[in-house]
Image: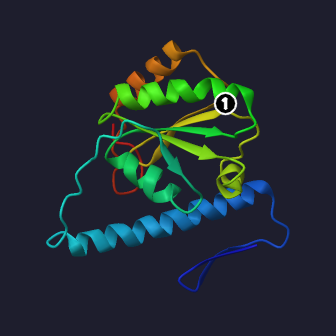
Amino acid sequence: MVALYKGEVLSRRQKPWGTDVVLAIELLESKITEDVSVQSKEDTSNKQEKPIVAENKPHHVTDQTFQTDVIDYSSELPVLVDFWAEWCGPCRMVAPIMEKLAEDFAGQVRVAKVDTDANPGLSQAFQIRSIPTIMAFKEGKLVFNQPGAFPEAAFRDLVQQLIDLEIPEDDAEGEPQQ
């Protein structure tokens, strides 16, 4: 396995483990983030703020759109992600709850859904072993990850905690400020 970014070899493994794939993805994401931050500093004079659109339905995300639709978007609004599959009974129980949450928290939280059968790359990257798996992202960071279906009240508490969560800012060395 080789992780390449703009022709540069970031990681090379002869016999990769599952964790090596995740590490390679993290390396690639950090390089992309570095490039985006450098580019955004250059483009600040020409860049217009993208308005946040209040979505009242779950947003369907794919392997190709996850970075933009979840990781990057979570710097604007927290994102609650439901990893599901069509054949999964508990997933079908969670689906109407996700619909209600998307309606009730429109403009405060993005509710996203990832079909694990159609998006095996994300399933592998996040080591999804059981569905439904619920994840939450805020400011580009994974802040919650748990498999299983919950009652609606537990989801509502989770969403409220996600909205209220304060992520400490990192200093130049990447250490949280005291």
Relative horizontal placement of residue 117, taking residue 155 as reference (left or right):
right
Write the residue at 81% across / 64% down.
16
User: Percent from the top left, x then y, of residue 148?
Assistant: 68, 26
Q: Is residue 170 above or below residue 89?
A: below
User: Percent from the top left, x then y, of residue 4?
Assistant: 62, 78
User: Percent from the top left, x then y, of residue 42?
Assistant: 23, 75
Q: Quadrant of the N terminus?
A: bottom right
| Image quadrant where residue 15 sits | bottom right
**Observer-nearest residue: 138 or 115?**
115
| Image quadrant where residue 144 sits | top right
| Residue that lies at the very extreme toward the bottom in this rendered image | 7
| Residue that lies at the very extreme toward the right in this rendered image | 15
**Amino acid tagged 1:** Cys
Q: Is residue 158 above or below residue 6?
A: above
Write the residue at 26% across / 47% down.
52
Q: Is the image coloured rainbow, by chain, by secondary structure, or in one colour?
A: rainbow
Relative horizontal placement of residue 144, taking residue 101 as reference (left or right):
right
Query: Label 1, on which residue?
Result: 91
Write the residue at 56% across / 37% down.
135
User: Percent from the top left, x then y, of residue 50?
Assistant: 24, 57
Relative horizontal placement of residue 169, taking residue 154 as reference (left or right):
left
**Observer-nearest residue: 170 or 62?**
62
| Residue that lies at the very extreme toward the left in this rendered image | 45
Write the residue at 71% across / 46% down.
127
Q: Secondary structure at mark 1?
A: helix
Relative horizontal placement of residue 70, taking residue 90 as reference (left or right):
left
